[in-house]
Image: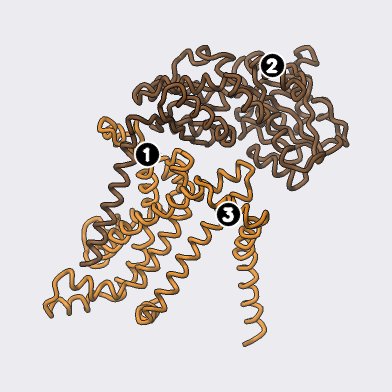
Chain colours: A brown, B orange
Amino acid sequence: MKETTMLRKIIAIALIGLSSTATNLRAENVEILNVSYDIARELYAKINPVFIAKWQAETGQILSVRQSHAGSSKQARAILQGLQADLVTFNQVLDVQVLADKGGFVSNSWQADLPNNASPYYSLPAFLVRGGNPKGIKDWDDLARDDVSLVFPNPKTSGNGRYTYLSAYAFALNKNGGDHKAAEEFLRKILKNVAVFDTGGRGATTTFVERGIGDVLITFEAEVENIRAKEADGAYDRVVPSISILAEFPVAVVEKIAKSRGTEQVSKAYLDFLYSKEGQEIIVSFNNRVNHPEVVKANADNFPQVKLFTVEDVFGSWPDANKTHFATDGVFDRLQRR
Amino acid sequence: MLLRHYILIGTAFAFMAVMVILPIVSIYHRAFSEGWDVYWANISHPDTLAAIWLTIATALIVLPVNIVFGVAAAWAIARYRFFGRRLLLVLIEMPLAISPIVAGLCFLLIYGAYGPVGSALDPFGIQLMFNLTGIILVSFFVTCPFIVREVLPVLMVTGENEEKAALTLGANGWQILWFVTLPNILWALVYGAILATARALGEFGAVSVVSGSIRGETMTLPLQVEMLYNDYNATGAFAAATVLTLLALVTLILRALIALLHPQSRTHSGAQR
């Protein structure tokens, strides 16, 4: 019989635990959940304490910011299934748009609600080459040379890889006066030079840095710099191409949830903070590009000039680009079959 | 022993060394590669501590439910002939055949805020997914076959003679369960419980779908390991992995200890196996 009372106790404790997570609200304290993409953990770990202090100074409220990190498509789906996000900070525009389209979680005008298409910072595909740049890589042309081998994630499975593919395509279009045949031929050469197609950015980095495969790793500029910062001085160099595609990091308040939780105001303030000088200085320290004029000026030396296109400029829209290039039997598949 | 016996045994050991020992040793090697201080800093990070606690709490909550359900189900199937008995057997084994990630998605579709059950509970402010409840539900799903599978064959083999004898001697239901049935199945029950716990501790796919990945809150150790690895913090990932392997070792040691303390239960089930 002893065991049954033990069991009862354990179950009782479990139930108490469950009910306390369900009603985890205290009046004087405010709590928001920032649902974010997978590799932004360190960035928001730096931003949150600064904003929390600022919010307390302004309102007297004790704020806590909870963070959720995973692939942004997975995160969007989790919110659609009930993850109580007050705001999202993603790395794919489509994943925020889904929240607007399905059930009005996010306002339809979300991209116009905040500056720069609701993207407080941006990045672009750039190159990481071995120390001293032994192959003399300067621009996308060099990646099509016969003696160069490349590492970047598979565009079929990775948003990062899609940016690389589309940037190379935009470069070739620009160079050949909009000739799609020539652009495809250029891409065929680039794809032929790929040594390893990993499924994601993390895998591609491991292939290039730890396994020592390839002459060039193509990934976001911020990643290029973060990798260089972690490795020995001079082990790798950064090369920024003349043309690239703008990679946006869109943010939005999840109004449907924030309204019901009474956190709309603080969520908006949080996003505004990302655009403030203080916020932008933290963001730029993670090697993302920002738009705040003073911060841009102070960091001008770190970010070479690039001619940036948006996916909309060149390919119409993300769904169009996906359909034409990355769908089964699309251009990418065709070029892969050598 | 003949030479070929030695070759056979040597092959078995070599295989285990390559497939099991080497990866485990490499976890510890990598975790301590930057020294004890870095290891400790990684382990004592609040997020990692929260993940350790959440993982243990999940296992501790799931285990008693599993024991009660597992013994009851195994006993019902072994002792009674009823309509749907075979179906019940198949259903109990189903979680082994279903990919955990699919299981997680099914739970999300049914118990998520817009699923049939989730939306019915929503007006009462009860949320089942993206918190401890969701993690416990899917952990129970993936671990529920283990105890039944271990206990059922033993119940089948021991038969019901001892239980019937106890009944004729005037024992009541609880006495039969406590003094006759449980001692017979003890070793199988413990073994099943250990397997189920090990599985609950290490489950990734199903938990990953319903967790919501809120750091310091709904990240179990396997999720924490993956997140740290994706953050380019390989040392931190391996440090968290050492805790996970340590927990697994503790369950194995518990099993050995119980075998030592209850030698008769070991010989008993040993005779049946």
Residue B249 appearing in the image: yes
Q: In this view, does A222 lie above or below A195?
A: above
Q: In which quarter of the image is the N terminus of chain A?
A: bottom left
Chain to which mark 2 belongs: A
Residue at the extreme bottom:
B1
For label 3, count other residues whose C-alpha is less than 10 Å away and answer few (under 14), some (14-19) or many (20+): some
Whether residue B99 sits left or right of residue A175 in the image: it is left
Name the residue beneath numbered marker 1: B129
Name the residue beneath numbered marker 2: A309
Using the rendered image, report if marks 3 and 1 lie on a common chain: yes
Q: In which quarter of the image is residue B228?
A: top right
Using the rendered image, report if marks 1 and 2 lie on a common chain: no
C-alpha gap between disc 1 and disc 2: 40 Å
Looking at the rendered structure, the kind of residue marked 1 is: Met
Chain to which mark 3 belongs: B
Whether residue B213 sits left or right of residue A261 in the image: it is right
Name the residue beneath numbered marker 3: B40
Secondary structure under tag 2 reads strand
C-alpha gap between disc 3 and disc 1: 32 Å
Q: Where is residue A269 in the image (x, y as percent from the top left)?
A: 48, 20
Looking at the rendered structure, the kind of residue marked 3 is: Trp
Residue positioned 31% across, 35% down in the render: B118
Residue positioned 30% across, 71% down in the render: B156
Residue positioned 18% across, 73% down in the render: B175
Whether residue B62 sits left or right of residue B55 in the image: it is left
Q: Where is residue A329 in the image (x, y as percent from the top left)?
A: 63, 29
C-alpha gap between disc 2 and disc 3: 46 Å
Q: Which of marks 3 and 1 is nearer the N terminus?
A: 3
Q: Nearer the viewer, mark 3 or mark 1?
A: 3
Q: Where is residue B188 in the image (x, y as percent from the top left)?
A: 36, 70
Secondary structure under tag 1 reads loop
